[in-house]
Amino acid sequence: MRSSRVSALARFGAAAAVAAVAMAGALAPVAASAGTKHAPKAPTNILVNAHFVRGSQHKSDVINGLLRSRHHAVAGATIALRCRTAHTKFATVASATTDAHGKVSFTVTPTTKTACKLVFAGDATHRASQSAVVILRAPKHH
């Protein structure tokens, strides 16, 4: 058997080439699947406030909401108004679409103490979110 003398530099180069080919084969599926991943959805938040309607003798309230994502308004999004009274679960009572400034408004006339919140179900580019709960009081009868 004949022995050949190969320099350490040549052996290192051959080993590096084998490793590079092996890594390229191992990374190919990862690179292929990276193109099929969906972009992460942007977070959202809904700011809410409620006030009585002037001229309605405090019988009606307006619930205003503002849908934002990363400090920018989200226009054209559907917002659900979900309400509940004592001993009931939240249920959708109305829905509306945000305007160009991300604003939405609902007018309600509660007959009893009612808790309401605004809910955004999310879409292709935005995550779902919900507002804080606002408590509406029924008008006092005189």
Image (cartoon, rainbow, N blue to C red):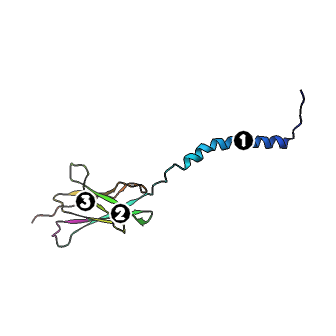
Seen at 28% across and 65% down, the residue is: 105
Mark 2: few/some/many CA within 10 Å (<14, 14-19, 20+): some
Toward which corner of the image does residue 27 lie, by quadrant? Answer: top right
Q: Which mark is residue 19?
A: 1
Mark 3: few/some/many CA within 10 Å (<14, 14-19, 20+): some
SS at mark 1 in the image: helix
First to last magenta residue range: 56-62
Q: Nearer the viewer, residue 50 or 29?
A: 29
Amino acid at circle 1: Ala
Q: Which residue is mark 3?
A: 135
**Alpha carbon separation for disc pair 2 and 3:** 27 Å
Amino acid at circle 2: Gly
SS at mark 3 in the image: strand
Q: Which mark is residue 27?
A: none
Q: Are marks 1 and 3 in contact (CB under 8 Å)?
A: no
Amino acid at circle 3: Ile
In this rendering, would 105 be left or right of 128? left
- Note whether 15 is above or below 78 in the view shown: above
Between discs 1 and 3, the one toward the N terminus: 1
Seen as rendered, the residue at the extreme bottom is 55
In this rendering, would 20 be left or right of 28? right
Between discs 1 and 2, the one toward the N terminus: 1
SS at mark 2 in the image: loop
Toward which corner of the image does residue 60 lie, by quadrant? Answer: bottom left
Q: Which residue is mark 2?
A: 76
Q: Position of residue 76 (x, y in %)?
A: 35, 63
Residue 23 falls within the magenta-colored stretch: no
Q: Nearer the viewer, residue 68 or 55?
A: 68
Task: Classify the position of the N terminus by image quarter.
Answer: top right
Most prominent secondary structure in the magenta stretch?
loop
